Amino acid sequence: MNIVRASFYSAMATASRLVAGLVVIKLVAWFAGPEGVGKLGQFMSLMSLLAVLAGGGISAGIVKYVAEYRHDAQRLSRLLAAALWYALCASILMGCIALLLSRQMAVWLLGDLRYESLIRVLAVAQLGIAMVNYMLAVINGFMDVRRLAFIQVLGSAFSIVMVVWLSQWLHLYGALLALVVSQVLWLLVGLPSWWRSPYFQRGVLRMRFDREMTLRLAAFSVMTITSALLPPLINIAVRNHLAVQFGWGQVGYWQAVSKVSDAYLLFLTTAINIYYLPKLASTHDRESLVLELRNAYRYLLPAVAGLALLVYVLRDWVTRCLFSADFVSANALYGPQLIGDVIKVASFILSYVMLAKAMTRLFVVSECVFAVSYLALVYVFTAHFGLIGAMYAFAVNYLCYLAFNVWVARRYLGRL
């Protein structure tokens, strides 16, 4: 399986997830306007955070070590038993915390106690989401991209049906509720497909504490939780700052452009995640690593630059199609955001060297530093340039992150 074929299958899966996400955004824009889209962003930040924490943030670790141990049955069995135990404990813990803090979360994130029950549903769903994360990580570790794409396509189809049905009944609340329920429903598609795979054995569903494997997974847990925890929290802080400075309507414009950016980048970041993490984790000689990185830049950078240019040219149509005529003011924000997207993908490719080679301390420190620097740049640039300053901050911060990752990759390759 090469990057081109992996990209094809991941593109199918990503397209289905993209359609599901755009259906949600369109319905929310229709029911609640720019303010509703701003609140949708807040809830999706919470969902993405809890979805990662549900399994203890070990999905990347499972992918890495399954790729390394897939020809060593004993170590693979130990890894998967420890991973399932870890994920179960973490999901129960996070579910209990979310239940206890559901009232505070509803007020802080959505400004309305009516959404407390929604937070409670999300808390209870943590166990199912953890199982989905575990299953997809194992499949990804075996580089079974075709099966992974199949599960994601059918799971997204379930999500679309659920969103349309519940949003017609409960409007904004229903759309948000569907986001939670549909995540768990992926098990209806994923488990039968996984069971029929040639590498499935009943032993992968056994739980056992294994000190060595747990410590290995814990290192990835720290890295994944850091990278998953900081962006939603920073984005929440950015939204709150923009809301105070410019109002929730302006936050909706910023959120709309950010969502368009996330949508088309999903094709590329998914391909990188599915292919490069297991590939770099199982590659240890310098020449092979350099070749993989060069191929990534050869195929992915022209792709992201082309997509960014296309989105910029069609920005007015994209905004009206995905949202409504009320969002036309968002068109002025696309330029710096799309430039930042190209830089983001360039830095994202190199950052996987840290993740695949378990550079835990360096990864965590860099995530913290650049998260804080982004928030600081938002404060500085919005004070000078207004709302578009948030997009300038995004591009400048990723330019600095790219320079840092170039330094890390050169240092690591120089040691091999």
Image (spheres, rainbow, N blue to C red):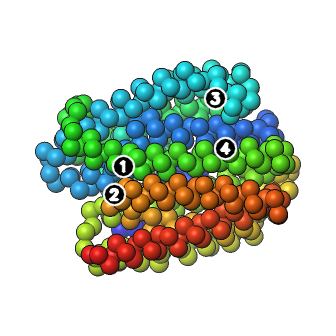
Percent across and percent down for residue 208 are 22, 31
* Measured Cα–Cα span from mark 4 to mark 1: 24 Å
Q: Amino acid at mark 4?
A: Ile
> Which residue is tagged 2?
358
Helix, strand or loop at label 4? It is helix
> Which residue is tagged 1?
220
Q: Quadrant of the N terminus?
A: bottom left
> Which residue is tagged 3?
105
Residue 6 in view: no
Decide if residue 62 is on the left or right side of residue 51: left
> Which residue is tagged 4?
236
Q: Identify the residue at image location x=38%, y=65%.
A: 353
Q: Amino acid at mark 1?
A: Phe
Q: Amino acid at mark 3?
A: Met
Disc 1 + disc 2, Cβ < 8 Å = yes
Percent across and percent down for residue 198 are 23, 46
* Measured Cα–Cα span from mark 1 to mark 3: 27 Å
Q: Earlier in the sequence, mark 2 or mark 3?
A: 3
